[in-house]
Amino acid sequence: EREKEMCKTIPLGYIGLPSDAGDLVAFLASDASRYITGQAVNLDGGQCMEL
């Protein structure tokens, strides 16, 4: 019940999964991110946009 209520506060509608973090790590470790430096990435399903 509490999880359902929490999900209502997240624009993407679900609590992040370990695979969501893994996908970010895989991207940052890949050549596709070679020009990205010194960033803080919010991995929160868009929740910080609600603040």
Image: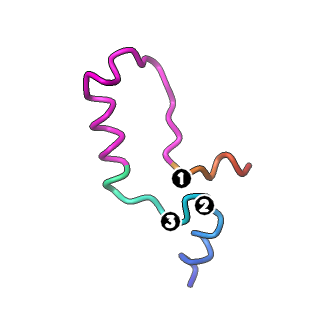
- The numbered dot on residue 7 is none
User: What is the x, y in percent for residue 8?
Assistant: 63, 70
Mark 3 and mark 2 residues within 8 Å of each other at the beta carbon: yes
Task: Indicate left or right for 11 with 26 as reference.
Answer: right
Q: Return the residue at label 3.
A: 14
The disc labelled 3 sits on which kind of residue?
Tyr
Q: CA distance from mark 1 to mark 2?
A: 6 Å
Mark 3 neighbour class, 10 Å CA radius: few under 14, some 14 to 19, many 20 or more = some
Q: Quadrant of residue 32?
A: top left
User: What is the x, y in percent for residue 47?
Assistant: 62, 52
Please give the range of residues in magenta: 21-43
Q: Measuring 27% from the left and 29% from the top, which residue is drawn there?
A: 29
Regarding mark 1 in the picture, which secondary structure is present there?
loop
Mark 2 neighbour class, 10 Å CA radius: few under 14, some 14 to 19, many 20 or more = some
Mark 1 neighbour class, 10 Å CA radius: few under 14, some 14 to 19, many 20 or more = some
Q: CA distance from mark 1 to mark 3?
A: 8 Å
Q: Return the residue at label 2.
A: 10
**Foreground residue, 21 or 13?**
13
Residue 14 lies in the magenta-colored region: no
The disc labelled 2 sits on which kind of residue?
Ile
Q: Return the residue at label 1.
A: 45
Answer with mark 1 or mark 2, whichever residue precedes in sequence.
2
Q: Quadrant of residue 37?
A: top left
**Vertical side of 51 occupied by 9: above or below:** below
**Vertical side of 20 occupied by 28: above or below:** above
Q: CA distance from mark 3 to mark 2?
A: 7 Å
Answer with mark 1 or mark 3, whichever residue precedes in sequence.
3
Q: Measuring 48% from the left and 63% from the top, which residue is drawn there?
A: 15
Q: Measuring 62% from the left and 76% from the top, which residue is drawn there?
A: 5
Regarding mark 2 in the picture, which secondary structure is present there?
loop
Quarter of the image for the N terminus: give it: bottom right
